[in-house]
Structure formats: structure tokens, C-alpha cells
């Protein structure tokens, strides 16, 4: 266990060092020491014969005690403890496999300790006759070419000296060959009998009485033995096969080994005409196991019987009989020729049940009496050596390729084993005696030893620390001066808040630099990384956001567009980015923290000495690579923005200073990258202290120059021009917005269009059949009860497309696409889509802008120059385009886009919806283009209902509150698209019968009757979805599933259905302001399996209504009391909710009057924007009793709403919405001077969920009076 070789008694050797290194078999370090080097552990195969095991032990000792390389011995992980030389039980374990070729293959791919299948790196003894097995592995690159291990092996037929003296002719194969020797061989070599067979067929007492052969009957585990010391001497039986008088084909028995031995005894006996011998063993082909062969030789010795056996040497077994009359004598055969070696039978032939195959070719009928032995090494050992650093390079490859043991040395050990001496003691003694010879196999520079060196108090680290502190002091001085001159024009334009952020980042940056220059500790290592990356981010991100905002403002101005730039939003973006960086740093710190780690380098003067330094570092270098890459990305973005902003007006133009700062940052970043590579990979060029000092200097100088370039010029200019800057008031509305009276009509004409393009590029003709040319209203057929369409053009055209991607991305679209486009919002979200008929090209097309440009150009050509595109959005395969006439577009504000995915996992965008909202003349209008779950059946119907609910809940565009979706917030909303609702006859008929039934009704033009089976209409009636929405009657043929040709020709794989639909909804009191003018399909659209649908609507804007109807001027009080609810949805897992009511409004003329001091304090503490009731625990039927909510209303206009949201309170998570009620403030005021009980249904995501009831009192105040107003106006994103 302790090892064999004591440390040498010289000055260069550590006398306290233990004799060997530990391996994975060692549970403690009592007998060994853990290797101080990262040498990979090797596994040596022990083999299933003694010479291989001895060789494996010698190799293990040399590697572990001289080379200091951890090594195990065995075949599998579970075997290594018992097979190791250092096994305290001192047992010689034989492997279950002779040559584990698959184990060499396994060792090339995995760590052997991680698997329990055969896995070895080194075979110490391989017979050259195995070349047919190892040569393919050499060509494959699994192993190296075998190396001579110093041994020579002999094999062949052996007879005892006792037999040779009586039959000397048998020592030459001619004495065995021919019929003339048959009788002698048959009578001489009788058949060995095992213990059981002897008792049952020979013993007269069945071994119940002892005789001169056996003392007793065998135990169950002894029945197959041929010899048992003191119990069964063995017995050789003269059988009928030995009787040549009775049997002319008589034979004697020759003992053959298992077929996996590299011998060809069948071939030799047959082709050499040794007809007097045959194999009669219990194994297939008449063979014996190795143990049975040894038992039979023992039995022959004990009974003075003759025996002839195939055996090999070196092997300790026959050495036991070397001084007796049963000493082995090998039968001489002709030497093997090259031709014979070529035609030797393979292992498959040797193990074949067919005797003809076992005999093989006559040209291969020779015995390999003498052959060289070799060792085989897996290539992974060499790869690990080559790929390792010089410091951690293992000597194992060189040792295993060159180590040799001679036959003489091995025979001495085997002879000792034959005498019964301890094998391990014999091996250990031999290693000690031959230590000098074995040390010659150790490569130059090994074994290595460590020498510690720590030097973190040098002048350069002290100077770096002082300079870092100086830069921090300069940054604080800059902060003071910025605060002092914050009112100057330069500082106002530069935004002091952003300058403070930049300087704070530079301070953090320099604190990190200081920590790099001090002696590493776990705290300083991690803190340095955190401060450096956070400081760099805080410095760069505000500059990027501010420059990007200025650039965006200038671009929008050139396009005559209005945008809002909110400083709070920009600061929020900074915070979000910082949180992302902090999250990355947290993951880094948890998974692979930067801690003081040993860094080793080879001593130039003595390559066996490894100098150990301590430096900060993680296990993996990619953490630092990502950190530096992030800084590089920030610099690239800054460089791009600097280039784009070069034409910005002088007051805001920072392109030159930004570009110069980026250049300096880039230079220092390159220097840091170089230093980091040296610092974390190879510090042989400089000491760690010098590298740390240089790195600290680079970071501090980087921050200092950034302040000199970007901050100090602004401070200097402010000092020179200290006068305060006075701003002028700017009107909110942009100058280019036209006067409302410029419109010729009070009504807003809206055309809603939807089409599933089927992933096919539409032709311009098909689009023209769907979208009216020049936007003319007369191109659309009005409903029958209407007098006709207006003779004007549509004001707004909303176009929704599904499956709107295709693969011809390389198509040439021409040069000019119509000059400058007035796009208010143009985003493309590259969500990867999936569809049952899509290929990879379709997915790529969904991320390509070519199709988007193609559609824009075709639609622009159809509508003409009188229309501009004010919104465009792509989400996977869905597209939404919003167009408006020039005159109307100028009055459209607050265009916002959102959406939601409902594909697999709510991630894929093959299904989902796009929501676009706008404000026109105080009228909030929303459009939702959707593509819902496909296919027929109840499950898919429910999926569609859930899809539209999810889209409404997640795809919000209004920022008043997250508890309000667009269907509640909008004054008018349209939902359209391939909603996939099917015709459902509600019968158990087969699919084809339903198709036939639908086609018959279509042929009869019974569209009203067919529409009666429409799932969507039924779902609206049953309250399954979209509460409050309506859809016009489909008085036209179903739009799905058709052939892409003129008219309606249906494919019979699907039931014809109205899948492409348009729905609409108006807020309370505004239902009569929206009228349906037309609703039709477009049969001339011929490029898809859907026919498009379009609907025309007219809307009277709220601003127009205010001008035609009396406005409710004055001040009113609104009191809500006696609030209760029932049948609320369950918001918690226990089946109950903890509901409270929250009150919200969309008008600045509404104020909440708080009478309760506790209510005011609670709002001050928690910062809640909207008033609310107390929550009631564990109920679905809440009653708020005497709670009362009091509001004041000033000059109420049409369309101003009060929202009451029922919300489930959660103490440890986000509160959940249960539903919302919307109330028209104008309608409430109509109830003036009396009480009214109101009962409303809660709606959330288009689904009804419980009811609430309350009393409302509205009173007009005769004169203005001061009230204590706690909340007024509106607030976004509570």
C-alpha cells in the first residue's frame, strides 16, 4: 500500500514525500499523496495470465512512484481496486477478457472512471499473432503501433519428461504423425475423467467409500474438477476410443485450450496427419478451460499418467514441475513461414462449430513456437500529452512507449511465484533491485517538483494602486463641478444625470483596477470583475442611449414624425441592462467564481522545477472572454452611433468626442485583452505582480482618458460660460399636423382586410382583387340593407395576413421602392415560425426583409400615392399593415404595436396575434390580426378560444394598467384573421359525410343555413370567447379550403368553413357610432387555399360627437357604494380568491377624493397609483359593505371611461386580474341627482367571469370648491 521505492537520499529530493501518488482507488491519503499535477489517470489492463499481470504491476509502480502519474489496473471501474498492485488483500486477479480491444476504443472517448464498461489505456502484453485484430485499430487511429515489451513467448504441444523418456520419438512431430503412430498415441494418452464422471462410471461405490483415487464424493461446486489436492488424484480412463483392437480409428487425447487462444491445433492435427490424437474436452470443439488444463497436468503428475497439452511460456504453472519428472518438454514442429503466418486461421474460424472451418487452409497449418511480445497504447494517452501545457504534461506516454522487461527478469519472478512466494513481494523486490534501470525510462525533467513564489508588493503594484485612487478623486471632483454648473446650456444639453452615471461607472471601473493590483483573495478577485464590468457598462450604456435617442429624434424630424423621448424610460433601460449584466456576473460567481488559483510556469534553468504563483482566475477562460466581448460590443455600437450622428446639430453633436473616446477605449481594450491572455494563460513572460500592475494601469488610464475626452471639455466650457440656460415652451402638437376641419367628412371610413396567403407569394392581380385600387369605397359591395357605399375613399385600411412568408428571397425587386416612406413604426420580429407544410427556406424567409418590401411596394402601387403606411409588423408568418390616407394620417397619434405567440409553448409564432392601436380625434381604435389553432374537433375549438384570450391578455398596447386589455380600453376594436373556426354540424357522422353535407348547402346557396352551424357564432352566443364582440353574417360561400383558382372550388380534405373572419366591438355608449357598411369574400384571389375577407365600417370619432352633442361641462361628484360581487373566478389553488376592486380612469378631469387618513398613508407608503378597496379573503362572493369611493369629474367628454377591475390579492406574488367592468362617465352623469343600482359582468381577455353590483350617486356641484385630492390624472403601468 505504501509503495516500493523509498525517496532517494540526496539534496534535491523531498524526504517527506510519500512513495507514491494516489489514484481513484485510494479512499484516503494515508498511504499516498495527491498528485500536485493535472496528470490524467491511466488504466492498465491486467490480463488473464500471470506474465501480463506482473508486467502491469511493474508498469504501475514505475508510473506512480517514479513518474508520479496516477494509475489503476483492471478492466472496469469496479475491478481496479482488487487488481491494483497496491491492493492490501494481495490477491492476483485475472481479467475476464484476454484482449479488451473495445476497452481501448472506449478510452479514446471518455474518462475510464466515469463508466463501468471495459475501458483501458494500455495492454502490457500482446502476442504478435494478434496482428489481425490490432492492425485495423492502428489504421482507424484507435491505438499506436505496438512496441516491443522486451519479452519473447513460446507456445506449442508439451509432454512431461516422464513421457519423453518412454516415447522419445514424440519430442518431434514426426513421432506423432501417420497411422503407424496411431496405436502408440491412443494407448499412451488416455482420456482424463472429472470427479463426477469418475464417481458415476468408474467407482464401484460411487465414491461413497474412499479408494486410491478419491477420498469422498464431490461437493456441488467440485463436480467438474479434474484434480483436487488430497481429495481427488484424477483418473485417466482407457475407453473404446483408446482401444485400437476394437476401434481401427482409435485416438489418444490431446488437451487443447479455449478457442480464443491464438493457436491452430485443429489445423495442425489434420494437415500434419496426426490422426492418432483428438480433442475430447467439455468445451465446443473438444477444448478445455485454462484451469482444467492445469488440473489435468496435476492429475497426470499425481497418477503417473501420460499427457500431451497445448501450453505457452513464460508462465509460472509449468515451472512448478521444473525439477520433477513432469517437467515440460516442448514438441518440435517446423518453423513458421511467412506464408503460413498469412493463412493462419482467424479466431472466428477457430471457434467455429464446423470442423472444416476450424482446420482452415493447409498453408496455415504451422505452430508459432516462438514470437515477440508487444505492448499496445491507446492514442488518447498521446493526445492528452500533446495537448497539455508543458507544466502539466504527463510523462506517461514516453514511459509506456519505452518500458521493457526481459524474459530472464520475468522468469525469475514467475519461478518465485511457482514456489509459492508472494507475487507482490517478488515484484516489489525486483523493482527495488532494478531501480536504476527503470529510471532510464523516465523522460528528462521528470519527476517534477513545485516551488512557491509570491511577489505582490512590488513598486509597480503600489504605483498602480495610487494612480487608481487619483483617478477616482478626479472623478469625484468632476461630479462636484457638474453639480455646480448643472444649469448652464452645455450641461443642460449634456444631461447631468447621464454624466453622473458615466462618472459613477468610471469610479467603479477604477475601484476594480485597484483590486487587481492587490494580493489576490476570494473577495478581491470577484469584486474586481464585478466593479470592472458594471463600471464599464454604466459608463457606456448611458452614452449609447442618449446618442441613440438624439439620432432617433433627428431621423424622425426628417420624416415629419413625432416621437416621445422619456428620460425615465431611458434610465429604466440602463437599469434593465445593468440587471442583465449583474445576472451574468451572478451566474459566473456562483458557477465558476474567480478565486486565487495557482499559476505554474517552468523554471528556465531547471525544467524539473515548476514555479507556483497565485493569481485570480476561473476554471474556464470563456467567462472573461464574454466579459471582454461585451465591452467590445458596446464600443462597436458606440462607433456606429458616432458615425450616424455626425450630421446632428452642433448643440447635440457628440460624434467627434464619442469617436475619439471609442478609439481610446478600443486601444486599451486591446491592451487588456493581451494582458488578460497572458495573465490567465501563460505568465512566463512577466511575473504576476507586473501583469497585475499593468492591467490596473490600463484600466485606470482608460477611465482617465475617457474623462479627459468626454467630461472635462463640457466642464471647461461651462466654467467659461456660466450663465444659466432658459428654455422656451413648445407646443405638444407637431407643426405638420393638419387642422381637423380639413377633412371633408365627419365619419371615419375603415376597411378591414384579412387573408391567409398559404406561404405563397401573392400576385399583384390577386392583391388588387382584395384591396381596392386607390382605396375607393365603391369597389366594395355594400350590405343589402345599405343604400350603397360612399363615393369616397377609405380613410384607414387595416390588412392582416397569415402564413405570409415564402422562399423566393433572392428575387430582384428593382431599384427604387418609391423614395422616402412615411413609416411611423416599422419593426420586424424574427420569431422562428413553424407550419405543417413549411421547409427551412420558409423559416429563413420569415426573417428576411425582401418579402416585406415586396408586399409594401405592391400594396403601395394598388392604393396609390394618396396613402401612407403608418404601421407594419411581422411576427413569424403573421403580418399586419396599417395604411391611412394622407389627410387622416396627420391626425393619427399614439400608434402602438404589441402581440403574443400561441404556438408550441407560447414561443413559436406560427400562431398568435398582432395588436395595433391608434388614437384618432380622441377615439382609441384597436386592430387585432390573429391566426388561431387549426383543425376540427372540440379540443381544437377550445384551443382557439384559449388562443384569443391569451392574445388579448398578453398583447396589450395601452399603458394605463396591466389589468386592462385592449378590448376593454378601446373605444372601438376589430379582431380579424384566419381564426380557424369551422362549420360544426354537431353530429356523429363521418368526416366525408359532413363535407358532402356542406357542399350540398353551398350548391343551394344556403349560406344562412350553413352559417347556422358556424363555431364562432355559436361560441359568441355561448360566452366561450370575445364577450361583447359581434361578427357580421357570412352571406357568402365558405372561404376555406379552396383550390387556388377563380371562384369557389373546394378541397374535400376539410369541411368547407368560414375560417377567415372579422369581429368588432364598441365601448359602452358608443355602439351606435360604429356601423357595418360591407362584409364580403374575394373570389378572384387565386394564390391561396383561403379566400380573403374584407369588411367596411364607418366610425364617428369622439371629437366629432363632442362637437354635435352637448358637452357635459361643470363639476360633478361621483359616489360608488354598496359594492358586492358573486361568481368570481378562483384565483388561487384552493378554489377561492382574495378579491379587491381597483378604480382607474382615462381622463385628467377625474380625481379621487380620499376621506380616510389610513388610505392616504397606505398610498404614500406603497406608492399605489389607483384607489382600491380592501381585499376580502377566501371568497368568490365578496361584499365590501359600507366601503365608499368618491370621485370628482370636470367637463366630461364622450368616450371618457371609468374602469373597475376585480383583482385577486397575492401576498408573495403578483396580483392576478379577475375581470374588468368599463363605465362611460358621460352615461353615469346622465343619472345626475338620483341613485342608480348598477350591475355589470366582469370581462378579462374577452371572457366573462362573475358579476359586480354597486350603487352610484352623481351630483352636479353648483360652484367650485376646494377638496383634498389625493390622486388625479392618469398613471401608466401600475
Image (tube, rainbow, N blue to C red):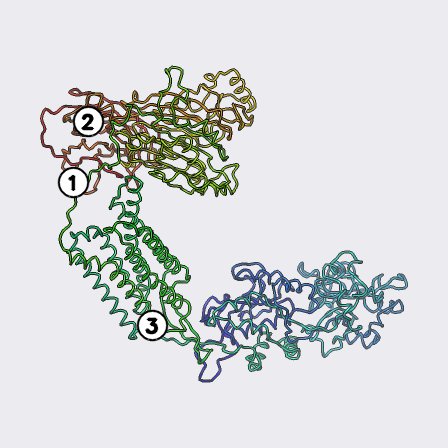
Residue 1266 x/y as whole percent: 9, 32
Find numbered disc 1 in the image and state the secondary structure of the residue it sits on.
Answer: helix
In the picture of the structure, the residue carrying the numbered disc 2 is 1196
Percent x, y for residue 495? 22, 51
Mark whose residue sits in front, 3 or 1: 3
Inter-mark Cα distance, 3 to 1? 58 Å
Residue drawn at (70%, 64%) of the image? 132
Residue 1212 visible at all: no
Kindly report the distance in space between the C-alpha atoms of the residues bearing marks 2 and 3: 74 Å
Q: Which badge, 1 or 2, is on the more N-terminal residue? A: 1
Q: Nearer the viewer, residue 479 or 296?
A: 479
Residue 589, compared with residue 926, is above or below; it is below
The answer to whether mark 3 and mark 1 are in CB contact below 8 A is no
Mark before the other along the chain sequence, 3 or 1: 3
Task: Locate residue 332: give its quadrant.
Answer: bottom right
- Are the residues tagged 1 and 2 within 8 Å (C-beta)? no
In terms of secondary structure, where does tag 3 sit? helix
- Dot 2 or dot 3, earlier in sequence: 3
Q: Which residue is mark 3?
A: 689
Depicted 779 relative to depicted 85: above or below: above
Amino acid at each position: 500500500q505504501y509503495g516500493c521505492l523509498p525517496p532517494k537520499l540526496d539534496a534535491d529530493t523531498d524526504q517527506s514525500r510519500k512513495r507514491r501518488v494516489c489514484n481513484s482507488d485510494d479512499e484516503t491519503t494515508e498511504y499516498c499523496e495527491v498528485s500536485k499535477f493535472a496528470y490524467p489517470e491511466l488504466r492498465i489492463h491486467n490480463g488473464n495470465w500471470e506474465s501480463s499481470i506482473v508486467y502491469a504491476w511493474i508498469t504501475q509502480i514505475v508510473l506512480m512512484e517514479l513518474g508520479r502519474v496516477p494509475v489503476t489496473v483492471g478492466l472496469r471501474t469496479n475491478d481496479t481496486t482488487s487488481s491494483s498492485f497496491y491492493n492490501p488483500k494481495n490477491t492476483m486477479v485475472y481479467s475476464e477478457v484476454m484482449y479488451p480491444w473495445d476497452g481501448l476504443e472506449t478510452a479514446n472517448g471518455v474518462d475510464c472512471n466515469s463508466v463501468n464498461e471495459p475501458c483501458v489505456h494500455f495492454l502490457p502484453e500482446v502476442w504478435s499473432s494478434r496482428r489481425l485484430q490490432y492492425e485495423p485499430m492502428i489504421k482507424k487511429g484507435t491505438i499506436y503501433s505496438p512496441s516491443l515489451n522486451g519479452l519473447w513467448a513460446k507456445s506449442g504441444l508439451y509432454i512431461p519428461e516422464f513421457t519423453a523418456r518412454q516415447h522419445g520419438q514424440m519430442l518431434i512431430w514426426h513421432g506423432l504423425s501417420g497411422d503407424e503412430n496411431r496405436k502408440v498415441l491412443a494407448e499412451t494418452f488416455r482420456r482424463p475423467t472429472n470427479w463426477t464422471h469418475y464417481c458415476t462410471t468408474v467407482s464401484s461405490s460411487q465414491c461413497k467409500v474412499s479408494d486410491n483415487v478419491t477420498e469422498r464424493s464431490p461437493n456441488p461446486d467440485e463436480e467438474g474438477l479434474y484434480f483436487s489436492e488430497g481429495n481427488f488424484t484424477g483418473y485417466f480412463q482407457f475407453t473404446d476410443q483408446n482401444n485400437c483392437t476394437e476401434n481401427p480409428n482409435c485416438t489418444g487425447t490431446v488437451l487443447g485450450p479455449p478457442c480464443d487462444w491464438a493457436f491452430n491445433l485443429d489445423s495442425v492435427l489434420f494437415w500434419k496427419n496426426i490422426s492418432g490424437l483428438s480433442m475430447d474436452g467439455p468445451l465446443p470443439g473438444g477444448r478445455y478451460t485454462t484451469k482444467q488444463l492445469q488440473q489435468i497436468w496435476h492429475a497426470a503428475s499425481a497418477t503417473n499418467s501420460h499427457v500431451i497439452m497445448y501450453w505457452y511460456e513464460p508462465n509460472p504453472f509449468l515451472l512448478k514441475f521444473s525439477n520433477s519428472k513432469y517437467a515440460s518438454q516442448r514438441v518440435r514442429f517446423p518453423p513458421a513461414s511467412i506464408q503460413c503466418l498469412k493463412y493462419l486461421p482467424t479466431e472466428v474460424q477457430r471457434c467455429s462449430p464446423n470442423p472444416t472451418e476450424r482446420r482452415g487452409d493447409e498453408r496455415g497449418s504451422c505452430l508459432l513456437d516462438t514470437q515477440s511480445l508487444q505492448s499496445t497504447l491507446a492514442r488518447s494517452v498521446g493526445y492528452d500529452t500533446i495537448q497539455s501545457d508543458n507544466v502539466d504534461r504527463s510523462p506517461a506516454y514516453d514511459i509506456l512507449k519505452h518500458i521493457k522487461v526481459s524474459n530472464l527478469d520475468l522468469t525469475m519472478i514467475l519461478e518465485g511465484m511457482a514456489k509459492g512466494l508472494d507475487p507482490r513481494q517478488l515484484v516489489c523486490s525486483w523493482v527495488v533491485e532494478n531501480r536504476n534501470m527503470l529510471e532510464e525510462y523516465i523522460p528528462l525533467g521528470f519527476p517534477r517538483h513545485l516551488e512557491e513564489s509570491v511577489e505582490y508588493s512590488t513598486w509597480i503594484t503600489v504605483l498602480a494602486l495610487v494612480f487608481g485612487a487619483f483617478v477616482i478623486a478626479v472623478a469625484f471632483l468632476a461630479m462636484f463641478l457638474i453639480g455646480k454648473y448643472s444649469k448652464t446650456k452645455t450641461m443642460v444639453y449634456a444631461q447631468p444625470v447621464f454624466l453622473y452615471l458615466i462618472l459613477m461607472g468610471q469610479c467603479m471601473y477604477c475601484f476594480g483596477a485597484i483590486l487587481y493590483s492587490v494580493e489576490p483573495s476570494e473577495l478581491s478577485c470577484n469584486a474586481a470583475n464585478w466593479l470592472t464590468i458594471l463600471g464599464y457598462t454604466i459608463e457606456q450604456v448611458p452614452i449609447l442611449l442618449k446618442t441613440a435617442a438624439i439620432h432617433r429624434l433627428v431621423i424622425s424630424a426628417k420624416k415629419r414624425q413625432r416621437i416621445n423621448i422619456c428620460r425615465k424610460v431611458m434610465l429604466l433601460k440602463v437599469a434593465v441592462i445593468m440587471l442583465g449584466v449583474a445576472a451574468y456576473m451572478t451566474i459566473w460567481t456562483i458557477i465558476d467564481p474567480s478565486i486565487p488559483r495557482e499559476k505554474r510556469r517552468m523554471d528556465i534553468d531547471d525544467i524539473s522545477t515548476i514555479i507556483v504563483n497565485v493569481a485570480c482566475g476561473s476554471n474556464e477562460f470563456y467567462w472573461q472572454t464574454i466579459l471582454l466581448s461585451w465591452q467590445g460590443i458596446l464600443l462597436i455600437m458606440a462607433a456606429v452611433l458616432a458615425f450616424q450622428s455626425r450630421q446632428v446639430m452642433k448643440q447635440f453633436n457628440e460624434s467627434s468626442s464619442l469617436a475619439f473616446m471609442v478609439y481610446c477605449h478600443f486601444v486599451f481594450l486591446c491592451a487588456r485583452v493581451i494582458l488578460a491572455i497572458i495573465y490567465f494563460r501563460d505568465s512566463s513572460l512577466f511575473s504576476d505582480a507586473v501583469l497585475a500592475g499593468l492591467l490596473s494601469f490600463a484600466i485606470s488610464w482608460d477611465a482617465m482618458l475617457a474623462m479627459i475626452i468626454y467630461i472635462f471639455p463640457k466642464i471647461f466650457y461651462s466654467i467659461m460660460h456660466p450663465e444659466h440656460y432658459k428654455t422656451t415652451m413648445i407646443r405638444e402638437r407637431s407643426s405638420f399636423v393638419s387642422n381637423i376641419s380639413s377633412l371633408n367628412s365627419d365619419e371615419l371610413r375603415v376597411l378591414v382586410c384579412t387573408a391567409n396567403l398559404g406561404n405563397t407569394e401573392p400576385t399583384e392581380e390577386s392583391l388588387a382583387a382584395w384591396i381596392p385600387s386607390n382605396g375607393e369605397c365603391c369597389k366594395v359591395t355594400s350590405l343589402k340593407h345599405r343604400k350603397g357605399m360612399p363615393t369616397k375613399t377609405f380613410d384607414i385600411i387595416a390588412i392582416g395576413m397569415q402564413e405570409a412568408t415564402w422562399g423566393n428571397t433572392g428575387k430582384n425587386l428593382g431599384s427604387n421602392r418609391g423614395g422616402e416612406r412615411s413609416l411611423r413604426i416599422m419593426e420586424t420580429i424574427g420569431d422562428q415560425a413553424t407550419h405543417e407544410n413549411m421547409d427551412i427556406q420558409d423559416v429563413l424567409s420569415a426573417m428576411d426583409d425582401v418579402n416585406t418590401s415586396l408586399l409594401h411596394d405592391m400594396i403601395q402601387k394598388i392604393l396609390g400615392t394618396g396613402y401612407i403606411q403608418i404601421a407594419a409588423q411581422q411576427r413569424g408568418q403573421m403580418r399586419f399593415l396599417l395604411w391611412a390616407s394622407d389627410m387622416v394620417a396627420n391626425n393619427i397619434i399614439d400608434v402602438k404595436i404589441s402581440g403574443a405567440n400561441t404556438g408550441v409553448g407560447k414561443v413559436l409564432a406560427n400562431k398568435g396575434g398582432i395588436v395595433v392601436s391608434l388614437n384618432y380625434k380622441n377615439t382609441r381604435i384597436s386592430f387585432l390580426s390573429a391566426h388561431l389553432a387549426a383543425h376540427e374537433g372540440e379540443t381544437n375549438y377550445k384551443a382557439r378560444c384559449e388562443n384569443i384570450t391569451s392574445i388579448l391578455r398578453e398583447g396589450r398596447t395601452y399603458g394605463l394598467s396591466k389589468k386592462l386589455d385592449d378590448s376593454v380600453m378601446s373605444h372601438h376594436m376589430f379582431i380579424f384573421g384566419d381564426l380557424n373556426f369551422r362549420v360544426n354540424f354537431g353530429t356523429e357522422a363521418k368526416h366525408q359525410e359532413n363535407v358532402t353535407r356542406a357542399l350540398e348547402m353551398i350548391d343551394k346557396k344556403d349560406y344562412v343555413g350553413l352559417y347556422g352551424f358556424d363555431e364562432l357564432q355559436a361560441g359568441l352566443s355561448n360566452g366561450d370567447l370575445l364577450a361583447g364582440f359581434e361578427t357580421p353574417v357570412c352571406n357568402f360561400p365558405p372561404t376555406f379550403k379552396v383550390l387556388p383558382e377563380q371562384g369557389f372550388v373546394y378541397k374535400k380534405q376539410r369541411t368547407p368553413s368560414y375560417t377567415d373572419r372579422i369581429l368588432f366591438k364598441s365601448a359602452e355608449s358608443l355602439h351606435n357610432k360604429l356601423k357595418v357598411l360591407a362584409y364580403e369574400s374575394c373570389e378572384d384571389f387565386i394564390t391561396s387555399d383561403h379566400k380573403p375577407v374584407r369588411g367596411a365600417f364607418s366610425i364617428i370619432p369622439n371629437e366629432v360627437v363632442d362637437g354635435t352633442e352637448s358637452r357635459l361641462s361643470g363639476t360633478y361628484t361621483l359616489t360608488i357604494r354598496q359594492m358586492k360581487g358573486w361568481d368570481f373566478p378562483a384565483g388561487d389553488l384552493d378554489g377561492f380568491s382574495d378579491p379587491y376592486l381597483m378604480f382607474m380612469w382615462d381622463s385628467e378631469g377625474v380625481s379621487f377624493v380620499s376621506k380616510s387618513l389610513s388610505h392616504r398613508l397606505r398610498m404614500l407608503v406603497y406608492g399605489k397609483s389607483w384607489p382600491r378597496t380592501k381585499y376580502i379573503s377566501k371568497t368568490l362572493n365578496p361584499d365590501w359593505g359600507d366601503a365608499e369611493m368618491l370621485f370628482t369629474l370636470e367637463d366630461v367628454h364622450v368616450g371618457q371611461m371609468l374602469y373597475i377591475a376585480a383583482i385577486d390579492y397575492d401576498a408573495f406574488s403578483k396580483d392576478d386580474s379577475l375581470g374588468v367592468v368599463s363605465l362611460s362617465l358621460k352615461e353615469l352623469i346622465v343619472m345626475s341627482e338620483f341613485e342608480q343600482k348598477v350591475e355589470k359582468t366582469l370581462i378579462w381577455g374577452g371572457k366573462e367571469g362573475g358579476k359586480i353590483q354597486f350603487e352610484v350617486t352623481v351630483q352636479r356641484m353648483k360652484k367650485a370648491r376646494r377638496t383634498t385630492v389625493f390622486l388625479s390624472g392618469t398613471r401608466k403601468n401600475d
